[in-house]
Amino acid sequence: ALERFSQAHGVLMGWTDFNTSGPICHDNFNQAAAGVACRTMGLGSAYGFFTGQSRSEVPNNYVAAVARCAGSEANLNECKIEHPTCYRGEMVTVLCSNFSRAAAETASGVQVEIFSGILFAKSWQSAWGAVCDDGFDQRDATVACRHLGYQWAIFKTGVRAAVPHSFSMGNLDCTGQENDLGRCKFAKSPLCTRGEAVALQCW
């Protein structure tokens, strides 16, 4: 069994003791395992996960692979854990619901927040609302995280979450070079439904 689990640079990590950690290999990792991983780390439920990941900051000293979870386990150690041979590019990231980040209003008048894993925005003299996933891509995610003071982003669209019925921003069109989400082109108050939220994680 592993001592604990955490995330580093967006990568799911396992600790063999209090001083030694390494990434979890993506072999056989699935949505059930992602849900248990978020629960184990105290980060709620999982909106999704990504395999085939690598980070230059994370060495490929894999400590384990989560081979099989039923999804009801309280801890990843209750799942079947294996120790396969894995290589760089076989890391896994999970998008958990209890990931939150906030930033002050910028010169553009736009505020950005990740609350319960969901991207929210507020433009000048408007109410907070979720960002709609229409047209949302990696460039938009990167700028949103940069707005919050982070360099890297992973995201998932089409997320059905407990968000307000009103969306504050949609049809985002960032070049990817902006430091402020308010400098991107976007539509105010788009007509979107609850299943069109964006889950975002930054590091």
Image (cartoon, rainbow, N blue to C red):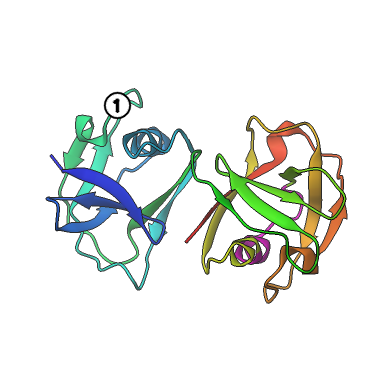
The x, y position of residue 134, in whole percent, is 76, 49
Q: Residues within 10 Å of mark 1 (few under 14, many from 20)?
A: some
Seen in the picture, residue 134 relative to 90 is either above or below; the reply is: above
In the figure, residue 30 lies in which quadrant?
Answer: top left
Could you tell me if residue 184 is visible in this image? no
Circle 1 SS class:
loop
Q: Which residue is mark 1?
A: 74
Could you tell me if residue 33 is visible in this image? yes
Residue 130 appears left or right of 20:
right
In the figure, residue 140 lies in which quadrant?
Answer: bottom right
Q: Nearer the viewer, residue 169 or 122?
A: 122
The x, y position of residue 42, in whole percent, is 37, 36
> Residue placed at 52% from the left, 69% from the top?
151
The x, y position of residue 203, in whole percent, is 47, 61
Residue 65 appears left or right of 199:
left
| Quarter occupied by the N terminus | top left
State the extent of the magenta-drawn residues as a range: 133-143
Q: Amino acid at mark 1?
A: Ala
> Residue placed at 31% from the left, 49% from the top?
6
Q: Nearer the viewer, residue 96 or 33?
A: 96
Residue 136 appears left or right of 17:
right
> Residue placed at 15% from the left, 58% from the top?
20
In the figure, residue 192 lies in which quadrant?
Answer: top right
